[in-house]
Image (cartoon, rainbow, N blue to C red):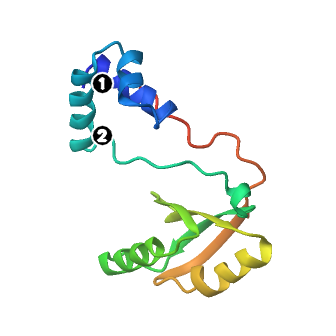
Amino acid sequence: MDAIDRKILAELQEDGRLTLTDLAARVQLSVSPCHRRLRALERSGVISGYRAHLDPHAVGLTFEALVFVTMREATREAITGFESAVAGLEHVVHAQRLFGDPDYLLRVVARDLPHFQRLYDEHLAALPGVQRLSSTLVMKAVVEDRALPL
């Protein structure tokens, strides 16, 4: 990856809807070489996909919580079962496995507090291998979906 590839990535992080012509102009390439580089970045997995960034409040998801998960045991089966189950929960929009205690951090969105309570009681507390859940409410997003520093 060279400086031009980094410019392409930086531009796409700012605006993923750029036309190929506009992208080429911004990185000072003609369209064909820009297209070749873009396809190579996609094929190699550097660009893993494209999607729209939605405002959760605008779609009725006004409540956000961080849920810390401590596992009962750290066996391969427990971890696999837990991670598969978490992947199936659509209201878990971000999940990270951590070193130390707790074992996982989940970012959960919901319509409101009663909705979160139902998600917590019916789904999160029922996840396989969980010993303890601890949650905290998100007051405000200060930095969110920042572009990667290139």
Is there CB contact under 8 Å for labels 2 and 1? Answer: yes
The x and y percentages for residue 14 are 51, 31
| Residue at (21% x, 35% y) in the render | 40
Residue 5, which numbered label? Answer: 1
Give the crowd class for mark 2: few <14, some 14-19, many >=20 residues within 10 Å. few
Camera-side residue: 66 or 60?
Answer: 60
The tag earlier along the polypeptide, 2 or 1, is: 1
In the image, what residue type sits under mark 1? Asp
Q: What residue did someone put label 2 on?
A: 46
Camera-side residue: 34 or 69?
Answer: 34
Q: Quadrant of residue 117?
A: bottom right
| Residue at (52% x, 80% y) in the render | 130
The x and y percentages for residue 84 are 39, 75
Q: In this view, does 38 lie above or below 117?
A: above
- Quarter containing the C terminus: top left
SS of the residue under disc 2:
loop
In this view, the residue farthest toward the top is: 28
SS of the residue under disc 1:
helix
